[in-house]
Amino acid sequence: MDAVRHLVVGAGISGLAFADWLGDDDCLICEAEPEVGGYCRTIRRDGFTWDFSGHFFHFKDPEIERYLVSRMGAEEVLRVERRSGIHWGDRVIDFPFQKNIHQLPKAEFVECLVDLYFREEREPKTFLDMLYLRFGKGIADRFLVPYNEKVYATDLDRLDVDAMGRFFPHADVSDIIRNFSRADNRGYNATFTYPRGGAIQYVRALMTGVNERRLSLGERVISVDPATRIARTELREVRFEHLVSTMPFSKLLAMCGIDHDREIYDWNRVVVFNLGFDRKGQGDHHWVYFPQRDLVFYRVGFYDNIFGDDRMSLYVEIGRGKGGDSGDLDLDDLERQTLEDLARCGVVTDQKLVASHRVVLDPAYVHITRRSLADVPGKKAALESLGIHSIGRYGSWTYCSIEDNIVEARALADRLRG
């Protein structure tokens, strides 16, 4: 039996940020996949650079950004002013929708404005409730409800009012009206940085502080005994003093034999098609949102408009319920629908598809509900008393940025090191 002070489960951003900041070789990182990075992996194919999805880093803390970029050597890191829009009939209007209703056709604009002014006044109980009460029926029905239903692939009444936290683009009536004449569409991601070599460069930056001899790829942890502090992998048993898990929290609970209500923990899947074409398309947006229910995707991103490349390079995102496993998705049919819909809405005209890649993110977005918010903290605290720490978007069962993952991982490393 092996024994380590710190056993880290998962070599994505959170796990690597913890190991890097910890600076302790009495550590073992077990990663089930054959490579590091988690969902921040990058694919290069036929001259195109794609990530598993659109992973753009929005830093609030310049120290963290400097820390990572300084470890990238000669890698070119682009600083980009976000250009995002919403597909709307024969036009693309500015994001966020609720602050740009004046760009709609006149009749729709008037309806949205009237509904906004005469909306009901009371405290919302669910995420869906919040959309109608804060923005009115016209805005909610046109964009906020259908778009979020496509993303989360669930009834929005199930989600907590604050399911998206600081990432939801809130605006009051004054903000919306002020935007009619003085546009201010800034949000948490008004600027972002992106390495020319893809998001994997941030992963490699973290890896410079990790002893690769303490990293075991292709080794899946399959059970954890909290009482004895022994984890069993497909290859061995490991005794630990502290276990740092980045796996989905519900999976960790099951692995540890912790009794829990599985109905509390729900999520969606996101199918991502990365598509490369022989020529540029129209427009200069970095990504565009598609709330229309008759279009299979909810967002399309344009790598070529970030890199300044001369061939159109897309990531296309499709939300699906958690289902059983990825085998219940007909990916060939989804790709066919995707290409048809890209042509129908004018993203693709006469360009020829020359390269492609597909991936299913499962889980993608966790469903944050009142029940999950009530259940997670107590169970996390109980596990911590046994030396088991759960971090990251999935480990903490939350909606957060990649930078938030790094901050959380560093804070835990500081605490355990002390």
Image (spheres, rainbow, N blue to C red):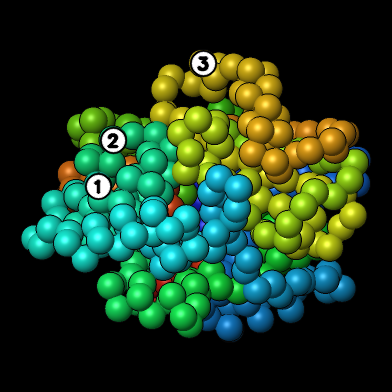
Q: Residues within 10 Å of mark 3 (few under 14, many from 20)?
A: few
Badge 2: how crowded within 10 Å, few (<14), some, or many (20+)? few
User: Residue 15: where, in percent of width, then height?
Assistant: 54, 55
Circles 2 and 1: CB atoms closer than 8 Å: yes
Of the numbered discs in the image, which one, if any, rests on residue 404?
A: none
**In percent of the image, x 62 and y 68: which residue is there?**
82
User: Toward which corner of the image does residue 310 lie, by quadrant?
Assistant: bottom right
Q: Amino acid at mark 3?
A: Asp
Mark 1, Cα crowd under 10 Å, few <14 / some 14-19 / many 20+, is many
Q: Name the residue tied to disc 3.
A: 328
345 or 192, which lies in front? 345
Residue 49 in picture, x, y percent from top left = 80, 50
Query: Could you give the CA–CA distance between mark 3 and mark 1, rounded to whole angstroms?
Result: 28 Å
Q: How many marks?
A: 3
Compared with residue 356, is residue 169 higher up or lower down, i.e. above or below? Answer: below
Q: Label 2's element?
A: loop
Upstream in sequence: badge 2 or badge 1: 1
Earlier-in-chain disc, 3 versus 1: 1
Extreme residue toward the front, this view: 107
Q: Which label lies toward us, 3 or 1?
A: 1
The numbered dot on residue 155 is 2
Task: Choose the circle earlier in sequence order: 2 or 3.
Answer: 2
Query: Can residue 288 be seen here?
Result: no
Q: Nearer the viewer, residue 183 or 399?
A: 183
Q: Amino acid at mark 2?
A: Asp
Residue located beneath label 1 in the image: 128
Q: Secondary structure at mark 1?
A: helix
